Image (cartoon, rainbow, N blue to C red):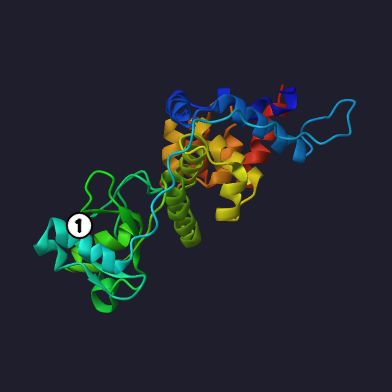
């Protein structure tokens, strides 16, 4: 990697982010360091940050070493009628509550739904009172997206719609409309990510963790993620760089007190945590932050 790409290196990741990412990469059968280093160099080259000494050829991403064999393809989506029959075979009482609405949507009891582990929010979502009131008055509107639980065949893991599920419980609803699908972990995380990005209220840190999980634990290619999210390769790398910030700064971004753009600029600061507090106290814009950092670098 050339010197101009040094600020993008993996050694900018925090110890916690590195450990989690490396453990996840083992499950995908590929080296996170090798993959991300190549991706970073290509991204820098695309932006003109790496001088291609003596070569006019574009820097390309080399093939990734073969990953472990993929899991068997998931079964076809379970039709609503089949869901009723399957539940009836195991639990007659519960089956009476699983009601097909149409070919795609089924009414499921709230107690058979679980948050699961494929959501893109790392913390328990806050449920606004306004959402609870709206659901109590108008129902949840858009059905939940769910898949069969891997640990309990009678339960369903929520892929998209966990806040609606929690709000519906607070509103006293006993059943919710859901679309039952068969998705791998990677497909489910992508679906959750796409929905939350569409709502434009996902923390950049949660977004970064989702990208890292998709690329390591799930072994997805960048093109698969960019196609599903509409964000380009440069955005993926810039967002994942935020994991290199100190925990205190990542928490401020999580809380919405700092923007992702502030975070990107702070990666080049000597003491990002201290400077982050000054940004909040002084109300600096990203442009003001960059200007002050440039001034400090020029100072003797």
Spot the residue most to the bottom: 138
Q: Quadrant of residue 85?
A: bottom left
Using residue 113 as the reference point, say whether residue 91 is left or right of it. left
Secondary-structure class at tag 1: helix
Spot the residue most to the left: 93
Residue 178 lies, in percent from the top left, at 31, 65
Q: Residue at x 14, y 68 (%)?
A: 96
How many numbered marks, from 0 up?
A: 1
Residue 186, above or below 60: below
Q: Is residue 122 or residue 100 the one in the foreground?
A: 100
Residue 81 lies, in percent from the top left, at 27, 69
Quadrant where the C terminus sits is top right
Residue matched to label 1: 112
Using residue 87 as the reference point, say whether residue 105 is left or right of it. right
Residue 186 lies, in percent from the top left, at 46, 45
Q: Is residue 120 or residue 278 the one in the foreground?
A: 120
Q: Is residue 116 something one can see in this rendering?
A: yes
Using residue 125 as the reference point, say whether residue 246 is left or right of it. right
Residue 280 lies, in percent from the top left, at 48, 43
Q: Is residue 188 or residue 7 the one in the foreground?
A: 188
Q: Badge 1: few (under 14), some or many (20 or more) residues near its Cα, within 10 Å?
A: some
Quadrant where the N terminus sits is top right
Q: Is residue 233 or residue 268 the one in the foreground?
A: 233
Residue 258, above or below 109: above
């Amino acid at each position: 990697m050339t010197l101009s790409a040094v600020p993008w290196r993996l050694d900018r990741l925090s110890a916690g982010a590195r450990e989690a990412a490396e453990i996840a990469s083992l499950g995908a059968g590929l080296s996170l360091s090798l993959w991300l280093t190549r991706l970073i160099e290509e991204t820098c080259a695309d932006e003109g940050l790496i001088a291609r000494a003596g070569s006019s050829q574009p820097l390309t991403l080399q093939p990734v070493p073969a990953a472990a064999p993929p899991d068997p393809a998931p079964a076809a989506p379970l039709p609503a009628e089949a869901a009723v029959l399957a539940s009836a075979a195991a639990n007659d009482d519960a089956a009476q509550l699983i009601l097909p609405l149409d070919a795609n949507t089924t009414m499921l009891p709230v107690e058979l739904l679980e948050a699961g582990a494929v959501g893109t929010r790392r913390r328990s979502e806050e449920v606004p009172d306004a959402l609870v009131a709206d659901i109590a008055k108008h129902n949840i509107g858009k059905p939940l997206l769910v898949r069969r639980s891997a640990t309990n065949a009678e339960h369903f893991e929520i892929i998209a719609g966990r806040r609606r599920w929690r709000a519906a419980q607070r509103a006293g609803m006993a059943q919710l409309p859901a679309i039952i699908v068969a998705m791998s972990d990677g497909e489910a995380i992508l679906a959750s990510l796409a929905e939350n990005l569409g709502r434009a209220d996902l923390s950049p840190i949660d977004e970064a963790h989702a990208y890292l999980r998709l690329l390591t634990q799930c072994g997805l290619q960048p093109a698969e993620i960019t196609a599903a999210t509409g964000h380009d390769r440069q955005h993926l790398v810039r967002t994942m760089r935020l994991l290199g910030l100190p925990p205190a700064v990542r928490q401020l971004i999580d809380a919405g007190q700092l923007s992702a753009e502030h975070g990107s600029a702070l990666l080049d600061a000597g003491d990002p945590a201290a400077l982050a507090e000054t940004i909040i106290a002084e109300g600096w814009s990203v442009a003001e932050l960059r200007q002050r950092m440039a001034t400090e670098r020029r100072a003797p």
